[in-house]
Amino acid sequence: MRKTVSLRRSEAVRFAWVSRDSEAARAGLRAGDVILSCNGLPTPNIAALHAALREAQGAVRIGIAFERDGERKGTVLIPAADLSRIPRYDPLPGIENVLLGR
């Protein structure tokens, strides 16, 4: 049974692409996935995603909730990089802000 998530006119962050050898790829994230939250913090835009990742500095595991093909899913990201280097406002490569609406 497939669970559909209703996201009415809210903003979210979508991966435009995912590098094969990245932490995101190892966590099972793919291009087109829409990131809903990071460690329980909503990610309505790139700045919020960056802030959530910076807040997770030192974490061994980071919980990611995302939507793929209308279905809400979850995964755990194991960070290998220094999360404190994530910029405050500049978009990360391969991530774009999207307006979701049905």
Image (spheres, rainbow, N blue to C red):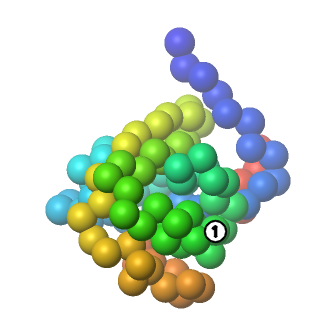
Position of residue 11 measured from the top left corner of the image (x, y, whole percent)? 73, 60
Residue type pointed to by label 1: Ala
Who is closer to the viewer here, 96 or 24? 24
Position of residue 95 measured from the top left corner of the image (x, y, whole percent)? 48, 70
Q: Report whether 80 appears left or right of 89.
A: left
Q: Which residue reaches farthest top?
A: 1
Q: Residue placed at 47% from the left, 54% from the top?
A: 32
Q: Residue placed at 66% from the left, 54% from the top?
A: 42
Who is closer to the viewer here, 83 or 48? 83
Relative to 1, say whether 61 is above or below.
below
Task: Quickly name the residue at label 1.
Answer: 48
Q: Residue placed at 76% from the left, 50% from the top?
A: 101
Q: Residue placed at 59% from the left, 85% from the top?
A: 89
Please tell me whether mark 1 sits on a helix, a strand or a loop. helix
Who is closer to the viewer here, 57 or 12? 57
Q: Quadrant of residue 59?
A: bottom left
Q: Is residue 84 visible?
A: yes
Q: Is residue 96 visible?
A: no
Relative to 52, say whether 3 is above or below.
above
Quadrant assignment for the C terminus: top right
Position of residue 6 measured from the top left corner of the image (x, y, whole percent)? 74, 36
